[in-house]
Amino acid sequence: MTFGTGALRGTPGVVDHRLSRRHLINEFKRGRLRQDQVCDAHPELIRAARNLGSPASIACPICGDEELRLVTYVFGARLPSHGRCISNAEELRKLNARPDELTAYVVEACVGCKWHHLLRVLPVGRSTAKVRRTS
Ligand SMILES: [Zn+2]
């Protein structure tokens, strides 16, 4: 499996990622989901979390042993199909100045148990300057 938006759990278009995250954690705690069903991060995501991720300052909701790390990927025209992993704010500023419509995915990941979840999907670049119509 190649890395891409499909490897990020959470459905783009679902506005409240926090709600689906909480639901998943509750289902795991109730024993309705096994750990290997919720801790299945792509190896590429775990590598990025370890090397480029920023500390989320909260413990992993599944194993409780590791601090979660936040990873931001940007997808869009003239970027690699597996997205570009953003390691600092300056890089994001540069992408934001591009004329292209790009999308940033902010993901939390645990390098210990491989829990991961999409937190936010944000427009980057040109699209941030205009109002998006939903209809
Ligand atoms: Zn964990």
Image (cartoon, rainbow, N blue to C red):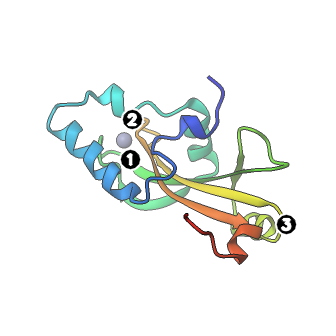
Q: Amino acid at mark 3?
A: Pro
Q: Amino acid at mark 2?
A: Cys
- Residue at 14% x, 37% y is 30
Q: Amino acid at mark 1?
A: Glu
Q: Say whether disc 1 or disc 3 marks the residue closer to the N-terminus.
A: 1
On residue 66, which mark appears?
Answer: 1
Q: Which residue is mark 2?
A: 113
Quadrant the N terminus occupies: top right
* Ligand 1 in which quarter: top left
Q: Give coordinates of residue 73: x percent, y percent.
A: 65, 51
36 relative to 76, above or below: above
Q: Is residue 32 left or right of residue 74?
A: left
Describe the element under mark 2 as helix, strand or loop.
Answer: loop
Whole-angstrom CA distance, mark 1 to mark 3, is: 38 Å
Q: Give coordinates of residue 99: x percent, y percent.
A: 85, 66
- 1 vs 3, front mark: 3
Q: Say whether disc 3 or disc 2 marks the residue closer to the N-terminus.
A: 3
Q: Give coordinates of residue 21: x percent, y percent.
A: 34, 50
92 relative to 10, above or below: below
On residue 99, which mark appears?
Answer: 3
Q: Say whether disc 2 or disc 1 marks the residue closer to the N-terminus.
A: 1
Q: Answer yes or no: do the residues labelled 2 and 1 have beta carbons within 8 Å?
A: yes
- Establish whether ligand 1 lies closer than 8 Å to the Cβ of label 1: yes
- Mark 1 residue crowding within 10 angstroms, few (<14) / some (14–19) / many (20+): some
